[in-house]
Image (cartoon, rainbow, N blue to C red):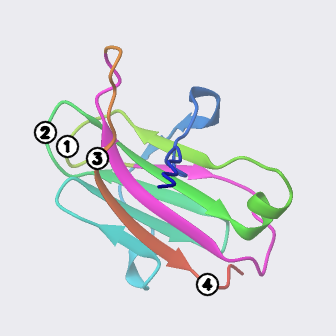
Amino acid sequence: MLCVTAAPAHAVGDSQVKTGTKVSGPDGACGDDDNASNTNVTVCFKAYGDKLYVKDGEADGRSAYGQFDSDYVYWNGGDTKACRNPYGAGTWVVCDYAIVEGTSVKFRGFTQDNEGTINLERNEVWGYDLNNG
């Protein structure tokens, strides 16, 4: 019997994480279908300007993260990128990126406590922008 296991495709290294800039809200980015949300984290992608907004939804001791990956990143050997919101429940952050226009973007939200040896990602939720630009 053949058993194949693979590491999660969504793992993000520390060098790929930006700490977001605190903002008052998602600047209209959540008004379209380019968002992913659960009670712990909301992630909204704004194609015009390539901005990823991340809201921490719960006072749970974990940071909220948004992460994106695009066709361009995948096919050209680039890295996935993540945006961390360390500011606590109810706050929003934004991270700016440069994504090639016309590429598909997938993004997700998750939470992480950033402590200890075992630092599991929790509360994962996915979203897509099928035609960035």
Residue 59's mark? 2
Identify the mark nearer the N-term, 3 or 4: 3
Q: Is residue 31 left or right of residue 21?
A: left
The residue that label 4 is drawn on is 130
Q: Residue furthest left?
A: 59
User: What's the residue at 34%, 41% (across, down)?
Assistant: 121
- Can you identify the residue that label 3 sits on? 91
Which residue range is magenta in the image?
93-115
Tag of residue 89: 1
Per the image, label 1 sits on a secondary structure element best described as: loop
Q: CA distance from mark 1 to mark 4?
A: 30 Å
**Where does residue 49 sit, x and y in percent of width and height?**
67, 67
Tell me which amino acid carries mark 3: Thr
Mark yes or no: residue 97 visible. Answer: yes
- Amino acid type at mark 1: Ala
Please rate how many residues cluster around mark 1, counting C-alpha atoms within 10 Å: few if below 14, some from 14 to 19, many from 20.
some
Q: Secondary structure at mark 4?
A: loop
Distance between mark 3 and mark 2 Cα atoms? 11 Å
Q: Amino acid at mark 2?
A: Ala
The answer to whether residue 26 shows anywhere in this view is no
The reply to whether the C-beta atoms of the residues labelled 2 and 1 are less than 8 Å apart is: yes
Q: Residues within 10 Å of mark 3 (few under 14, many from 20)?
A: some
3D distance between C-alphas at marks 2 and 4 = 32 Å
Q: Is residue 50 above or below residue 33?
A: above
Task: Using the image, determine if residue 41 lies above or below residue 82.
Answer: below
The x and y percentages for residue 16 are 63, 36
Q: CA distance from mark 3 to mark 1?
A: 6 Å
Residue at x 21%, y 49% (from the top left corner): 90
Q: Residue furthest right?
A: 76
